[in-house]
């Protein structure tokens, strides 16, 4: 008898870990590694948010609170949904979670039965399939083409629907591609989900990080029916530079929210109380510090695009990102060729060689279901970004 449950034994360990461990090893050995692998803003949490947590501690707010979240925070989340997304929720429909990841886990755990199929557009954030498998579900991938700006079309989703389809995972702005779906594209996808009665897990973690004039649109805002079918996941990690605080939230139809609230009360209970006070300050407080962060990301994204355009002649290509802080660099033209005698078979080799020879850390696209690419994060300084891209250019010039 195996000690590990079947459910958990299907989960793959994070493929990115080996790469980050190697990058950390090189850094510790004194190497100047440029890190394009970062998945979090390189900005500090704004001072007024930190102060709110300190105040909460000073006031003795260190006890248990309601498992699904502080009423004051739920109220702030309802206000956010109303003002930013045009969505009216009752506080009973909101669950405060330990980060966006926990909200995704909760949403799937509450809805997926063994054998249920979950459609995941690829490239995808690598956690989705693992959570689906953990719940006994079956991930079904639909591939977004680079020509379509790494966005899946409604018809592709419809083509993947079977009688077993329970859910679509939808993520805009997207990690890893930076794609931002337009309202029309979202409405077309929603129409398919409504017609086939498919739940949507809408991961909107990067909502605030959009550049170049695109606008965020929540799929739940399409219609009252779509609102019923959608579980919207969001959080403060990326939008407010609060990754280490661990605070996410979700909004769902009442029965789903009630189910999640029940099992959260038997698993994690409430998110730590002072973090919830900090989150209220984040959602209700001044927006200037975050506007500055978004402006800085926007400037880096523009510079990144400018430099990547200059690298096209070397055989590298990319799809312009409109949101989050990632860009997928297409490097399949180099597959089958050699760097200092070593054959490059795919994105894992590309990432490994770049780290060893160019001292550049990035994430192989295979982690996100697209082996043709590597993912670059621009959550690093402009100087490092410029130096890192110079190193990548020099590296590819030596591929024969
Ligand atoms: C698309 C996406 N969703 C959710 C998360 C999870 O966010 P959190 O750190 O709040 O758990 C991440 C984090 O990288 C992400 O990229």
Image: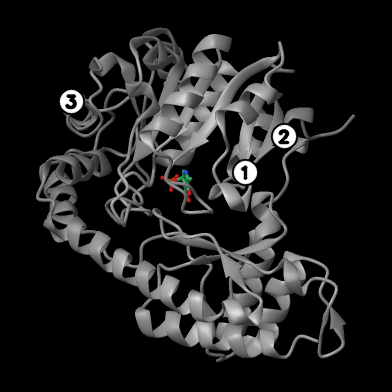
Depth check: give the residue in front, 92 or 334.
334
Q: CA distance from mark 3 to mark 1?
A: 37 Å
Q: Position of residue 57 (x, y in %)?
A: 17, 47
The numbered mark at residue 8 is 2
Depth check: give the residue in front, 109 or 271.
109
**Mark 3 C-beta closer than 8 Å to ligand 1:** no
Task: Read off the residue under disc 1.
Answer: 144
Task: Read off the residue under disc 3.
Answer: 75
Of labels 3 and 1, the one closer to you = 1
The numbered mark at residue 335 is none
Q: Position of residue 230 (x, y in %)?
A: 43, 20
Report if residue 107 is visible in the image: yes
Q: Which of the marked residues, 2 or 1, is nearer the chain's N terminus?
A: 2
Depth check: give the residue in front, 282 or 270.
282
Q: Position of residue 58 (x, y in %)?
A: 12, 48
Density class for disc 2 (Cα within 10 Å; few <14, some 14-19, many ≥20) is some
Q: CA distance from mark 2 to mark 3?
A: 35 Å
- Residue at horizontal 28%, vertical 52%? 213
Q: Quadrant of the N terminus?
A: top right
């Amino acid at each position: 008898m195996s000690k590990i449950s079947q459910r958990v034994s299907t989960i793959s360990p994070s493929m990115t870990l080996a790469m980050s461990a190697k990058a950390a090893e090189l850094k510790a050995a004194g190497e100047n590694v440029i890190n394009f692998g970062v998945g979090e803003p390189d900005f500090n949490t704004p001072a007024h948010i930190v102060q709110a947590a300190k105040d909460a501690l000073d006031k003795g707010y260190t006890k248990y609170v309601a498992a699904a979240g502080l009423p004051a925070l739920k109220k702030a989340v309802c206000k956010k949904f109303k003002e930013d997304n045009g969505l009216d929720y009752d506080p009973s429909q909101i669950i405060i979670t330990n980060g966006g990841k926990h909200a995704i886990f909760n949403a799937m755990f509450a809805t997926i039965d063994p054998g249920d199929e979950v459609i995941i557009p690829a490239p995808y954030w690598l956690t989705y399939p693992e959570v689906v498998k953990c719940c006994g579900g079956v991930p079904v991938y639909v591939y977004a083409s680079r020509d379509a700006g790494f966005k899946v079309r409604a018809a592709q989703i419809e083509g993947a629907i079977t009688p077993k389809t329970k859910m679509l995972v939808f993520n805009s702005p997207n990690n890893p591609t930076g794609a931002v779906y337009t309202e029309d594209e979202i409405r077309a996808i929603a129409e398919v989900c409504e017609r086939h009665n498919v739940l949507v897990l809408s991961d909107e973690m990067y909502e605030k990080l959009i550049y170049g004039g695109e606008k965020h649109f929540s799929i739940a805002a399409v219609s009252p029916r779509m609102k019923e079918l959608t579980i919207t996941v969001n959080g403060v990690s990326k939008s407010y530079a609060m990754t280490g605080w661990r605070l996410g939230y979700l909004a769902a139809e009442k029965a789903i929210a009630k189910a999640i609230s029940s099992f959260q009360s038997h698993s994690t209970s409430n998110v730590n109380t002072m973090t919830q006070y900090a989150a209220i300050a984040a959602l209700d407080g001044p927006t200037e510090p975050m506007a500055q962060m978004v402006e800085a990301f926007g400037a880096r994204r523009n510079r990144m695009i400018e430099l990547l355009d200059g690298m096209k002649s070397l055989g590298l290509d990319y799809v312009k990102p409109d949101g989050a802080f990632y860009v997928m660099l297409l490097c399949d033209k180099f597959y089958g060729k050699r760097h200092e005698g070593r054959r490059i078979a795919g994105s894992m080799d590309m990432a490994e060689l770049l780290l060893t020879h160019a001292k550049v850390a990035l994430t192989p696209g295979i982690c996100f279901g697209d082996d043709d690419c590597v993912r670059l994060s621009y959550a690093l300084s402009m100087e490092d970004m410029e130096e890192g891209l110079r190193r990548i250019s020099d590296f590819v010039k030596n591929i024969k």
